[in-house]
Each structure stands twice: as structure tokens, then as C-alpha cells.
Image (spheres, helix red, strand yellow):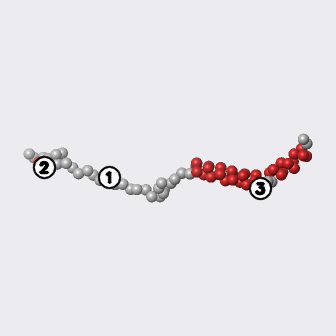
Amino acid sequence: MNINEIIPVVLKILTDIRVIGICIFVLLYVNFVFFVCRYKKNNKPKGSKKIRFKTPEPKKDSEQPEDESDNLGGEE
């Protein structure tokens, strides 16, 4: 077979509507698959940060007896 005989056959195959349709379908399918693989869900926006304040824990009565709290001058 000569190159002059192969070129028209290849052109008929490549210009067939079924071949063009299948190529477009495969291209869109692969593009969609890569989109799904790379997709990352953004859970929270970057600008909104929650501010948390630490509240002091209440003091227990057993840690600080009343006798020492009333004694300011150091006298017993």
C-alpha cells in the first residue's frame, strides 16, 4: 500500500461523525473525572474566624481559707 492510498482512508475515518462524537464525549468525560478528583470542599470561609475567650475558673473555698484572706497586716 502506498502513502497516497492511505491518506484518503485516514481522512474518511477521521471526518466520520461517529468518530468525532466519540472523541468529544471521551474528552468531556476525562475532563469531568479530573474535576471531581481535584475538587476540594471549602468548609469555612477564610475571613471568618471564631474568637474564643478563656474564662477564669472559679476558686474553690478549700484552697483559700477565710482566716488568711482577712489577715492583711500579717498579724495572727
Q: Earlier in the sequence, mark 2 or mark 3?
A: 3
In the depicted view, which residue is nearer to us: 13 or 75?
13
Residue pointed to by mark 1: 54
- Mark 3 or mark 1, whichever is nearer to me: 3
For the N terminus, the image quarter is top right
Residue pointed to by mark 2: 66
Q: Residues within 10 Å of mark 3 (few under 14, many from 20)?
A: few
Measure how far apart labels 3 and 1 are at the Cα level. Answer: 69 Å
**Does residue 73 appear in the picture of this structure?**
no
**Image position, residue 37 (x, y; %):** 58, 48
**Residue sitting at x 58%, y 51%:** 36
Residue extending farthest front = 18
Q: Residues within 10 Å of mark 1 (few under 14, many from 20)?
A: few
For the residue marked with disc 2, what is the amino acid? Answer: Glu
Q: Residues within 10 Å of mark 2 (few under 14, many from 20)?
A: few
Q: Is residue 40 left or right of residue 49?
A: right
Q: Earlier in the sequence, mark 1 or mark 2?
A: 1
Residue extending farthest top = 1
**Residue sitting at x 87%, y 50%:** 8
For the residue marked with disc 3, what is the amino acid? Answer: Ile
Q: Is residue 26 left or right of residue 38?
A: right
For the residue marked with disc 1, what is the amino acid? Answer: Lys
